[in-house]
Image (tube, helix red, strand yellow):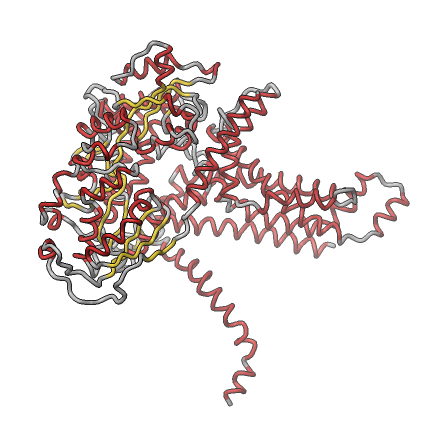
Amino acid sequence: MKKKLFGTSAAIVVTAGMLAGCGSNSAPQASTSPSAATAETTATATSAAATSAAGDKPFAGQTITLVTANHPWSEALTPLLPDFEAQTGIKVKVENYFEDQLTQKLTVQFTAGSSTPDVFMYRPLQEGQLFFKNGWVAPLDEYVNQDADYDFKDISPSAVGTTTVDGKLAGIPIITEREILYYRKDLLEKANIPVPKTIDELVAAAKKLHDPGAEMYGFVARGQRSPLVTQLSSYIYSEGGDFMKDGKATINTPEAVKAMTTYGTLLKDYGPPGVLNMSWPQAFGIFAQGKVAFLTDVDSLYTNATDPAKSKIGDKVGFAPFPAGAAGSKPTNVTAWGLSINARTEHKDAAWEFIKWATSKEIVLKQQQKGNPGARTSVWDTPEATQSFPAELVQVIKESMKNGVDHDRPVVITVGEARDAVGEVVMRVITGEKDIQAVADKANANLQAIIDKDNKK
Amino acid sequence: MRYNWFDRNLKWVYILPALLFVLVMMLFPILYTVWISFYEWSMSAITPPAFVGFANYIALFKDERFLDALFNTFYFTVVALIAEVVLGLAIAVLLNRSFKGKNIAKTLFLLPMVATPVAMGLVWMLIYEPTIGAANTILKAIGIHPQLFLASMTQVVPSLIVVDIWQWTPMVALILMAGLSTLPADPYESADVDGATAWKKFVHITLPLLKPTLIIATMLRLIGVLKTFDIIYATTQGGPNFKSETLNIYSYVLGFQYFKLGSASALLVIFFLIVMALTLLLIWMRKRLEAAS
């Protein structure tokens, strides 16, 4: 009883911490970095090619507005901004918003045809299609190869794939994440189970470690309809399926149905009670309480499992590449956040100058040292870049980057609706529906309708 | 001359700011919503809104998810409203006598009402968490099998109703206490002389006299419960499997997640009419009551 109460209160503390994290800075705050330049000049920018000349400051005196999400990446970037301002003479005005407010603010501002912000942070897979197809985002293809030092090829191809829309580069990746397998080293050792290398082994191991009587569960992952879709994706790819192919919805293929059945069954048969209302905070929460053996979710959230302040089992967490299905191990390797330029900006070249700096090898290295997983292969190979990460995790991340898939949800304009359509199938598996093929056929038709509507726009 | 005009129209000049505010901030959005509800628009910069007539409304009535949301809204409203009024009345009558620590008790009762709904929603989500939450810990301690609460498709609405009752019963109690304190003492005195029991006094004196206040409290809560959004969005976002999706939640999803602004507006117009009809019904009841007494 006493122990239970401790567990409960610990959970309260964890959530309170999460709330505090969400709440602070959630109000829009505009901070202006100190800079010598005071007046915004309207001088026309010279061509970007000229900027590479050393010591040249063609954009001196220009001011660009940067809108960021309330994210560790922005926190780590702010103290570095004075360097950029000194180097280029460009003044950067930063506005910081909480995720959902950010999307709403950007959508409204772009709909109104505003020329600010010049540069903004966005979620390529959630808003990328909507922003790009509406013509709100300036394509960056002509910029990235102008400067050999920038070394665009160094940025992971699947991360670039995520920010590419209709063959055009809509943004530069800044934060990447991959789906991996979290497991409890101590439990596997005790039961003498090797780390699962395939999905079948994962199911078998989860079954073996599942002991609801002792409040010990085999497996947990997101079970809420919409949030689960991004985590289901690696299961679908690893079985050889995808959400859509050449404009046709493919979630009723045998591969996809098998993956969705596996995911739903793992949660239904070996998951803790209440999976239907779990997104990542709840899934990580119960894993961190030491009540679950396996968890599949993205690597960028790993501190929720390892940080002693949030987790009772921080030192017992193991990391493994996503287990292989019929088509091998094909985890998501996506860009969670990217940087883009507003198509209507009056400072396009200065804006690119900023992105070039913010996504340069030097800055990405500094970001990664602060725990922000970037997209540059060379940085991942630099030992000092990964010091803050658990060594085992770095290996898993590198492994996952090799065979990763560049999207983790159906790539359409109305992502929200598409996610609900796909999530339906897993919901029905969890609630015990027998004829999953029929459910998948119906969901496939719904997804197809969404794709068709997109094509008409 | 100018001063004359000003003097003659003084009453209009003074209400002008308020009038403008109502027009710009309330009437315009409502009319704009009605206008948009006849169009199909997805906030696209390339495709302008397309006129579709009543198609959005017709599609909604064929949409199972809308009909479920309609049912959930009424289910939630009816149960929560009855419970809140009955419990609120009981608390008001209980607190209407003088006892030691009355003011402290009153203050404590009001606390849930002043707490931020979204924060409270998150606290309740934790209380309801099936494995490590307080609710199941207590249930297990008294020998009851643990429940799923918000994660169960059948228990989710009752669980949310409990949160709403917890949060809003104090407001009903507060209004009714104010009503009780204005009741005349004479009827009670004559009832005492006639030897009426406490229950008889309650049914035959307190209730009839309190009726106008009861109707006001019911009306305020009716509107409040119908448009409940915060606690549902903070805890389940309409899940699991849309089983706690009310009209408000569905319209938010349609508008801001699916970018179907026409459908979302059509839904809100229907919702507006429902709230309007119910409110008019209550006002009519109150008028009839006043005419009768």
Quadrant housing residue A249 = top left
Quadrant housing residue A42 = bottom left
Give coordinates of residue A190: x percent, y percent.
37, 11
Left or right of B163: which side holds A198? left
Vertical order, B77 against A440 (above or below): below
Residue A54 visible: yes
Residue sitting nearer the eye, A9 or B177: A9
Quadrant housing residue A266 = top left
Q: Residue at x 52, y 36 (%)?
A: B123
Q: Residue furthest right?
A: B193
Residue sitting nearer the eye, A177 or A310: A310
Residue sitting nearer the eye, A198 or B41: A198
Residue B262 visible: no
What is the total number of numbered labels drawn onto the structure image? 0
Give coordinates of residue B45: x percent, y percent.
25, 55
> Is the C terminus of chain B in the top left, top right, bottom left or bottom right quadrant?
bottom right
Left or right of A354: which side holds A218? right
Give coordinates of residue B35: x percent, y percent.
37, 57
Give coordinates of residue A443: x percent, y percent.
30, 31
Vertical order, A295 against B18 (above or below): above
Q: Residue furthest bottom?
A: B1
Left or right of A255: which side holds B275? right
